[in-house]
Image (spheres, grey):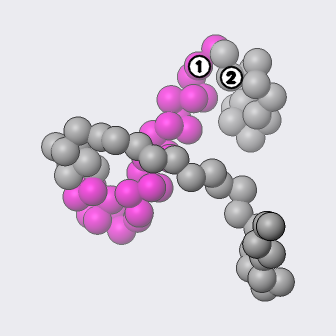
């Protein structure tokens, strides 16, 4: 059985991911996110999107949003 979405809940196109980081890196990124007033998830997503934009393989996967 699949749980139904609430009618007023916006659709979310994000996918969950468990990511294990070295403790020192996690701490540094967490402090950065606090200083910037954004979530840690936002910091990591921004870094990955910037990295992905520079990868030559990105055109292979049909992700128009990320094929800058």
Q: In x, y percent, where is residue 3?
A: 76, 72
- Front residue of this view, candidates 19 and 44: 19
Q: Which residue is mark 1?
A: 55
The residues colored magenta run 30-56
Q: Position of residue 12 (x, y in %)?
A: 71, 63
Vertical arrangement, residue 2 with respect to residue 19, above or below: below
Q: Which residue is mark 2?
A: 58
Residue 2 lies left or right of residue 66; in this view the side is right
Q: Residue at x 36, y 68 (%)?
A: 37
Task: Relative to 57, say whether 22 is above or below.
Answer: below
Q: Is residue 12 above or below residue 65?
A: below
Please, what secondary structure does the residue beneath circle 2 have?
Answer: helix
Task: Give the residue furthest to the front.
Answer: 1
Tell whether 49 sits left or right of 38: right
What mark, if any, has residue 6 been given in the picture?
none
Which part of the image, by quadrant, shows the N terminus? bottom right
Q: Quadrant of residue 14?
A: bottom right
- The image shows residue 23, relative to residue 35, as above or below, that is above
Q: Nearer the viewer, residue 36 or 42?
A: 42
Compare residues 12 and 48 and report the one nearer the observer.
12
């Amino acid at each position: 059985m699949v749980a139904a979405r609430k009618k007023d809940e916006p659709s979310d196109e994000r996918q969950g991911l468990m990511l294990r980081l070295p403790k020192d890196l996690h701490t540094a990124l967490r402090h950065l996110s606090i200083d910037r007033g954004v979530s840690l998830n936002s910091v990591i997503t921004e870094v990955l999107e910037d990295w992905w934009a520079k990868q030559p393989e990105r055109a292979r996967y049909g992700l128009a949003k990320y094929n800058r």
